[in-house]
Structures are given as C-alpha cells and as structure tokens.
Image (spheres, helix red, strand yellow):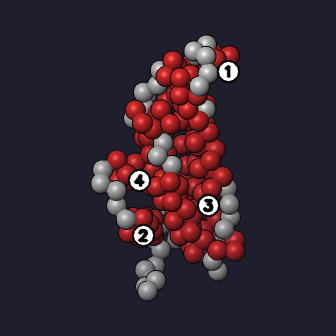
Amino acid sequence: MHAARTLLAETGGELVFADVAARAGVSPGAPYRHFTNKTALVVAVVEEVFDEMEAATYQPTFEGEGPDWWSREKVRIARTVDFYFDDPLCALVVRGVAGDAAVTQARARRLDKQTRGAAKNVALGKELGVVPAHINPLMAGALLMGGVYQLLATALSAAKPKRRRLTAELQRFMARVLELPEKDDG
C-alpha cells in the first residue's frame, strides 16, 4: 500500500501495477494476490487516506483544545491544514485521483459522509447558540467541506502558501459562512 501511495503522489495519480510491485520489491504478480485490479488498489488507497484524515481531523472532539465550540473548530481547521501539508497524496485524493467509476464513487461516498458530519457539527453550534438559527446545517456543511477541500487542493497544487496564513484564511472563511461575530483573535 505504501508503494502505491508513493507512486500516486509522484505521478499525480497514475498507477501501474508493475511499478507498484517493483517499488515494493515484490514479484510482478504479488499485488494481484491482494487486489483484483488497479482500481481496487486505488480505492483502497483513497479509503486509507480518508480514514487517516478523519482520525486526525474529524473524529476528535478537541474538548481540551479550547473553551468553546468555535475555539475547538479553529483547532480542527488548523489540523486539517496540517494534514494536507503533511500528506502529499491528500490533495490529490480529495480533488480526484485518476481512476474509473469505482474510485470516483468511493471518493464521493467519503465526501458525503464528511459533509453530513460537518452538518451535525454545525447543528451542534446552533444548539449551543454560536451559529445563528437561520443557518441550514446541511447546506453549510456542504459549503464548508467543499470549500475547504477545493481551496486546500488548489492552494497546495500551486505555490505552497504559508500554513499559518492559509489556516487563518480558512478560519475567516468558515466564520463568514456560519455568520459568526467577528472577534479580534490578536
């Protein structure tokens, strides 16, 4: 799996089974013992990247990271930016790694799952009185997740911006989408 991830990152999404086997130092037929075809391998890589991203950025509550919901969300945003900067394959997977319909469907399922998770989180913000009552959690979740993914994928495929600046820009974007009152974070 590591060999496939490395090659996908190096090639911008192209993958040849023989190259994966050579990179892994195994026989040319070895990948076929674990994956029926190249698509199954790419789907497994996509799933693995999403699992890692969710474990690092979406599943933690960050309860100890801040006194209130928005403070914790700002930590989540920073961790998301860090994940993108640290995993060279992340932006490619979110943007759409090369592949057929099965790869596209796997990616779409994971993005939908994360959008629904974001909607639940926005609903929590509403319950806590942080997010205004008129905000639709599902629409806000879709806008936030789609915006974050597209922005990060685009920013990191161009000249790499500074982490802190990109994090601050994303935090301001999310605060505007959620119509949070402006605060001077100093």
Disc 2: which residue: 164
Residue sitting farthest toward the top? 29
Q: Earlier in the sequence, mark 2 or mark 1?
A: 1
Kindly identify the amino acid type of the residue bearing the numbered disc 2.
Arg
Residue sitting farthest toward the left? 159
From the image, state whether disc 3 or disc 2 is nearer to you: 2
Disc 1: which residue: 34
Question: Please, what secondary structure does the residue beneath circle 4 have?
Answer: helix
Kindly identify the amino acid type of the residue bearing the numbered disc 4.
Leu
Rendering coords of residue 146 (x, y %): 45, 49
Rendering coords of residue 33 (x, y %): 68, 16
Q: CA distance from mark 3 to mark 4?
A: 20 Å
Question: Please, what secondary structure does the residue beneath circle 3 have?
Answer: helix
In the displayed structure, does residue 39 sit left or right of residue 66? Answer: left
Rendering coords of residue 74 (x, y %): 53, 70
Question: Please, what secondary structure does the residue beneath circle 2 have?
Answer: helix
Disc 3: which residue: 121
Q: Earlier in the sequence, mark 1 or mark 4?
A: 1
Q: CA distance from mark 3 to mark 1?
A: 37 Å
Q: Is residue 80 above or below residue 149?
A: below
From the image, state whether disc 1 or disc 4 is nearer to you: 1
- As drawn, the label of residue 155 is none
Q: CA distance from mark 2 to mark 4?
A: 13 Å
- Residue under the point 41% across and 53% down: 152
Q: Is residue 152 above or below residue 169?
A: above
Q: Are marks 3 and 4 in contact (CB under 8 Å)?
A: no
